[in-house]
Image (tube, helix red, strand yellow):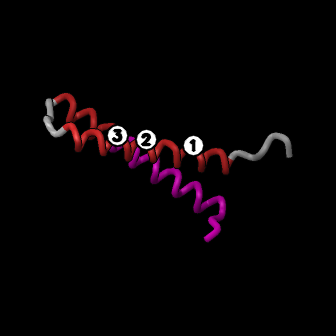
């Protein structure tokens, strides 16, 4: 499935919201001293994957300077 620019921008916005939400959840778990390190690690991995997806989408949305 090929997405048009508007769909990509919408998806990018959703990914940014999820990334920000995960950041808040992780921060909260750390502050309250949540002892489930495995859960925190999984959340951090998901956050990193989101960051990579966001970077990839942003690079697709930015026109190539050589073109």
Q: Residue furthest bottom?
A: 1
Q: Reply yes or no: does residue 11 show up in magenta.
A: yes
Q: Reply yes or no: does residue 39 show up in magenta.
A: no
- In the rendered image, residue 40, in percent from the top left (x then y), is placed at 25, 39
Residue under label 1 = 55
Report helix, strand or loop for mark 1. Answer: helix
Residue under label 3 = 44
Tell me the CA gap for discs 2 and 1.
11 Å
Q: Are marks 3 and 2 in contact (CB under 8 Å)?
A: yes
Q: Residues within 10 Å of mark 3 (few under 14, many from 20)?
A: some
Tell me the CA gap for discs 3 and 2.
6 Å
Q: Residues within 10 Å of mark 1 (few under 14, many from 20)?
A: few
**Main secondary structure found in the magenta portion:** helix
- Front disc: 2 or 1: 2
In percent of the image, x 22 and y 34: which residue is there?
Answer: 28
| Number of marks | 3
Report helix, strand or loop for mark 3. Answer: helix
In percent of the image, x 37 and y 43: which residue is there?
Answer: 45
Q: Earlier in the sequence, mark 1 or mark 3?
A: 3
Report helix, strand or loop for mark 2. Answer: helix
* Residue numbers of the magenta segment: 1-22
Whether 4 is drawn above or below 30: the answer is below
């Amino acid at each position: 499935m090929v997405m048009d620019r508007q769909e990509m921008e919408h998806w990018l916005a959703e990914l940014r919201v999820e990334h920000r939400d995960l950041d808040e959840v992780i921060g909260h778990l750390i502050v309250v001293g949540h002892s489930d390190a495995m859960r925190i690690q999984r959340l951090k991995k998901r956050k990193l994957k989101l960051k990579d997806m966001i970077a990839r989408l942003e690079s697709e949305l930015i026109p190539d300077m050589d073109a």
